Amino acid sequence: MKLALDEAWKYQGLTYPNPAVGCTIVGSSGEILAVEAHKRAGEPHAEIEALKTAYFKLTNDKNILDINSSSEIHKYLLNYHNNCFKNSSLYTTLEPCSHIGKTPSCATLIADLGIKKIFVGSKDINKEASGGNEILKKADVQVQTDVLLNECEDLLKPFNSWSEKRFVFFKWAQRLNGTIDNGVISSKKSRTLVHAMRDVCDLLVIGGNTVRTDRPTLDARLVNGRAPDVLILSKTKEFDKSIGLFGVKNRKVIISDNFSLFENYKNIMIEGGENMFELTKDFVKYYLCFISPSIGGEKSFIGLDYKFDILNIQKDEQDIIMWMKQENDRGSN
């Protein structure tokens, strides 16, 4: 399950409005056959990605590698599995879905493929998709629930938050000495990840002083994506409209001295420094920090006294990426 969790965290912030989910499949001799995750809304669920990978490893049937549609993967596995999953076990961070929507039911496929043991982290609270565990039990699949439950709940929290109201997270990049100023800090890969997150965000929040100083564009050009609406938090409404963010098509730019606009959005990313951190601390759920292996700059988070629980640590080609929440989870929406 830990492998599934770590894989799913790589796509946290990218799957909206779907949850981030990870899945591991273990063979009859305890070997790892697949570790996969749901990558983007509309694409195959984590279980389907893992079953596809495991099937290839078990059969060496390369034809399945060319299939990307969830429904087509379902059909192919049902037609050609030939009981290759017998005595395999499946671990998933979230109860397999029961409904047929943009993708077929994962629970039904797992049962039909003859997998007899499944380990589940979180229960699905989505009424439309829940019930997968019961489908599996009725098919005589052994289902163990609440595996690494707290960790799976932390992974699922963004989905639960925007399903009920909204999810707000705060992102920043810093160097080893804590500085956050003087130009580009994080790697190209990290910046591409942030652009992919912007592509699925409803709203991006930034401070007026940052806009005037950095003159950002705040789009998703590195992934050819959609630019989110922007809230500039500022007491004064005068800005140089030649600043890049004002020239992006099909986006709203709102200048306001408060956060009442949040009522209109579900998935909100905040980018900023010390002042923005303080202003948003009571409704930010998660914090995302990119740490660059460099030293330089002058400005850092000074005078703040906060402690965090680390939810997940990743490393790309250069940077360290940390998802965190405030210790004791003070944030609320």
Image: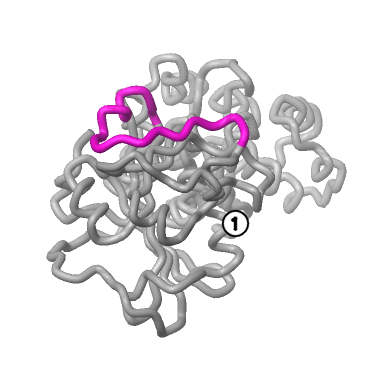
Write down the region rendered in magenta.
249-266
Q: Is residue 317 left or right of 78 when viewed as pictured?
A: left
Q: What's the amino acid at mark 1?
A: Thr
Q: In the rendered image, which quarter is residue 79 located in?
A: top right
Q: Residue 211's x, y, as percent?
A: 41, 53
Q: Residue at x 64, y 41 (%)?
A: 225
As for residue 263 lying within the magenta part, the answer is: yes
Q: Residue 53's x, y, as percent?
A: 69, 48
As for residue 265 lying within the magenta part, the answer is: yes
**Classed neighbour count for the residue bearing mark 1: other residues with Cα under 10 Å, few (<14), some (14–19), many (≥20):** some
Q: Say if 333 sits above or below 58 in the image.
A: above
User: How many numbered circles are shown?
Assistant: 1
Q: Which residue is mark 1?
A: 192
Front-most of residues 191 and 236:
236
Q: Residue at x 54, y 26 (%)?
A: 107
Q: Is residue 24 visible?
A: no
Q: Residue 302's x, y, as percent?
A: 19, 71
* Quadrant occupied by the C terminus: top left
Q: Residue at x 60, y 66 (%)?
A: 188
**Residue with the most extreme right position:** 63
Q: Say if 109 sits above or below 24 in the image.
A: above
Q: In the rendered image, which quarter is residue 259 located in?
A: top left
